[in-house]
Every structure is written in C-alpha cells, then in structure tokens.
Image (cartoon, helix red, strand yellow):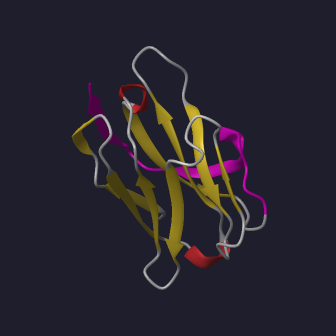
Amino acid sequence: QVQLVESGGGLVQAGGSLRLSCAASGRIFSWYTMGWFRQAPGKEREFVAAISSSGVTTDYAASVKGRFTISRDNAKSTVYLQMNSLKPEDTAVYYCVQGKQGLRVGLTEGEYAYWGQGTQVTVSS
C-alpha cells in the first residue's frame, strides 16, 4: 500500500522560508516522478513543482519559479520542497504526489497515481 506522508507545514511571515518533506513507502521510490500540488481556499488545485525519478529533470509553476526548489533523496524515499521568499498568496494546503512513471515531470493531476493527505502552509502579511 502506497503512503505519502507530508510534514513541515506551518505559519510563517511573508518573506520567510519553509521546507516541506514527503516520506513515501509502498513502491520503489526511485522509479517514479514526484511532485507537489497546492490548493488555496476557494481555488482550484494547482501544480507547484515536479522532479523526475533520477532528479535530473525538474519543472515549476511560473508563480514559484526562482523561489521554490524541489529535490529528492532516493536513499531516504523522500522528496522535499524548499520554499523561500514566501508570499501570502502561497497560503494553501500542499499535497505530495507520486507519478505513474519516472521520466516525465507531469503538470496535470491525471499524471499522478498517489496523493498525500496534505500539509497546511500559511503565510501572514
């Protein structure tokens, strides 16, 4: 059974930083693309970042590019999202996702097979 467990969310002031972690189990972690989506109150869920199985390929939403960094440690079966220069509009529930394959970094929900329960990130102004 696949499990994705996020941690690291919380309350931070604008301009601050947080690092989200997602520990995965149940499949061979190093075979699959990993990513992060988020959903703000009253808004659709949106893509944030993704990383290929090897870590060579990454992609980011335009709104976070240059501020967020996705990385992974295949030995620890963990993916990270380093978030810097946070803005109030980054406030959302952040979801860790695991892909259906390992080469492409998909931008759409349908490309991901498993989802975590989410962790709340709140950025105060």
Which residue is nearer to you in this view: 75 or 124?
A: 124
Residue 27 vs 114, above or below: the answer is below
Residue 1 vs 122, above or below: the answer is below
Number of marks:
0
Residue 35: x, y in percent?
Answer: 57, 54
Q: Is residue 28 something one can see in this rendering?
A: no
Extreme residue in the right direction:
104
Residue 118 vs 46, above or below: the answer is below
Tell me the residue at 32%/51% (across/down): 18
Residue 81: x, y in percent?
Answer: 45, 56
Tell me the residue at 60%/45% (across/down): 65
Which residue is nearer to you in this view: 34 or 2?
A: 34
Choose top left, top right, bottom left or bottom right for residue 76: bottom left
Residue 61: x, y in percent?
Answer: 63, 40
What's drawn in magenta, residue-wise? 104-125
Tell me the residue at 54%/29% (across/down): 45
Residue 70: x, y in percent?
Answer: 53, 60
Apparent side of residue 8 relative to residue 4 in the rendered image (left or right): left
Is residue 9 a member of the stretch shown in magenta? no
Apparent side of residue 79 relative to residue 107 in the rendered image (left or right): left
Apparent side of residue 11 relative to residue 112 in the rendered image (left or right): left
Q: Quadrant of the C terminus?
A: top left
